[in-house]
């Protein structure tokens, strides 16, 4: 998705260079237009999600990864919603999937309690986890 967004941005730069530049639209004015700026912020947000999702980051700072991942995803969906009106059905579907996942998690998994026992084995390094 990030690669496709990059190709989309590159295509927009080519369109600016080949067409809009000749009509007097400077690169700065093009990049600072509402449509392009929302797209750039969306792209940056998804790139940050990608880099913070890498295993090295996730393993070291899982709680930060989780917070950043959810926060940036919501931010990216809001930005994408305003970037282009044709993206709204896809944003709505993504939001529906997210809310369904959270609802099912809260209703089914989060309410389930599993009792376990932990036993340190004779070698002093192995932990046995038992559950019914």
Image (cartoon, grey):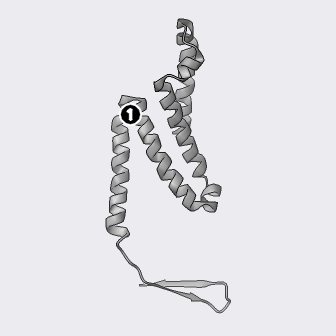
Look at 38% across and 78% down and name the residue there.
113
The picture places residue 19, in percent across and down from the top left corner, at 53, 10
Image position of 45 (left or right of 100) = right
Look at 53% across and 42% down and name the residue there.
46
Q: Determine the image quadrant of residue 64.
A: bottom right
Which residue is tagged 1? 87
Question: Dot 1: few (<14), some (14–19), or many (≥20) neighbours within 10 Å?
Answer: few
56 is higher (above) or lower (below) than 4: below
Q: Residue furthest bottom?
A: 122
Q: Residue furthest top?
A: 23
Quarter of the C terminus within the rendering:
bottom left
The picture places residue 97, in percent across and down from the top left corner, at 35, 50
The picture places residue 37, in percent across and down from the top left corner, at 51, 28
Look at 51% across and 51% down and name the residue there.
69
Return the residue nearer the eye: 14 or 36. 36
Q: Determine the image quadrant of residue 120.
A: bottom right
91 is higher (above) or lower (below) than 10: below
Return the residue nearer the eye: 11 or 113. 113
Look at 59% across and 19% down and name the residue there.
28
* Local secondary structure at mark 1: helix
The picture places residue 122, in percent across and down from the top left corner, at 65, 92
73 is higher (above) or lower (below) than 62: above
Image position of 34 (left or right of 126) = left
Image position of 79 (left or right of 121) = left
Return the residue nearer the eye: 56 or 82. 82
How many numbered discs? Answer: 1
């Amino acid at each position: 998705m990030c690669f496709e967004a990059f190709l989309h941005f590159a295509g927009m730069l080519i369109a600016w260079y080949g067409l809009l530049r000749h009509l007097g639209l400077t690169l700065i004015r093009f990049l600072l237009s509402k449509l392009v700026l929302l797209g750039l912020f969306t792209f940056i947000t998804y790139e940050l999600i990608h880099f913070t999702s890498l295993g090295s980051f996730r393993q070291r700072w899982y709680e930060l990864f989780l917070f950043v991942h959810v926060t940036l995803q919501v931010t990216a969906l809001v930005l994408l919603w305003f970037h282009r009106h044709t993206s709204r059905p896809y944003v709505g579907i993504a939001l529906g999937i997210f809310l369904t996942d959270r609802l099912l998690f809260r209703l089914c998994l989060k309410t389930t309690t599993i009792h376990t026992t932990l036993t340190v084995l004779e070698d002093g390094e192995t932990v046995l986890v038992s559950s019914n």
